[in-house]
Amino acid sequence: LGGYVREFESRVRQDMDEIYTRLDDVQTKRQLLAGRLNMLFRDRRAHTYTRLLMEAEARMSREAWTRATYASDLFYGEVISLHTTVLGQISEIRELQAANRRRTTVILELLRLEHRRSMKTSESRTTLQGQITTLQGQGQQGLARDSTHPEPLEEAGGSV
């Protein structure tokens, strides 16, 4: 009986060790699961916060895109307006340049005419001065002759 009791005792101890080992394993698994569950709850909060951040970022990005598109459209309209203004001014500049060329042509023609008139006036003046000099010379000769030979005034006026 003694051997039987020892074997029974040995088996009971082994079974107890095995039960404790299994209990420890179950406890360890339970602790692991509890740890994972706690981590998931913490992660859930972090994921919620991350989701909120991402949604805010997406909303701000859409708003920025809308503003940029609006600004781009606004600037495009302004550029088109300025382009139209510049084209109008270029056309006006060309018209002014053409008018300036016409005026320059008229002014040059008037200057040529004035030069010709001035030359004719100068020639006429020279001719008149020559005639005056001739007449003065004739007048002095006539006076010298008149003082030596008196003639009637009518003849003197007719010969002049």
Image (spheres, rainbow, N blue to C red):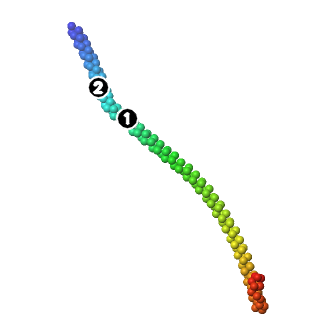
Query: x and y percent of residue 104 in the render?
Result: 63, 61
**Number of the front mark, 2 or 1:** 1
Which residue sits at x=72%, y=80%?
132
Drawn side of residue 95 relative to residue 46, left or right:
right
Describe the element under mark 2 as helix, strand or loop: helix
Circle 1 residue: 55
Which residue sits at x=39%, y=37%?
59
Query: x and y percent of residue 140 in the render?
Result: 74, 87
Q: Nearer the viewer, residue 149 or 55?
A: 149
From this viewpoint, which residue is outermost toward the top?
1
Query: x and y percent of residue 113 in the render?
Result: 68, 66
**Residue 19 is at least partly visible in this image:** yes
Of mark 2 and mark 1, the one earlier in the sequence is: 2
Verify CB contact (< 8 Å) between mark 2 and mark 1: no
64 relative to 33, above or below: below
Position of the N terminus, as image quadrant, is top left
67 relative to 45, above or below: below
Which residue sits at x=28%, y=23%?
30
Q: CA distance from mark 2 to mark 1?
A: 31 Å
Circle 2 residue: 34
Describe the element under mark 1 as helix, strand or loop: helix
* Badge 2 density bin: few <14, some 14–19, many ≥20, Cα 10 Å: few
Mark identifier at residue 119: none
Position of the C terminus, as image quadrant, is bottom right
Drawn side of residue 152 relative to residue 56, left or right:
right
Q: Quadrant of residue 153?
A: bottom right
* Badge 1 density bin: few <14, some 14–19, many ≥20, Cα 10 Å: few
79 relative to 108, above or below: above
| Kind of residue at disc 1 | Glu
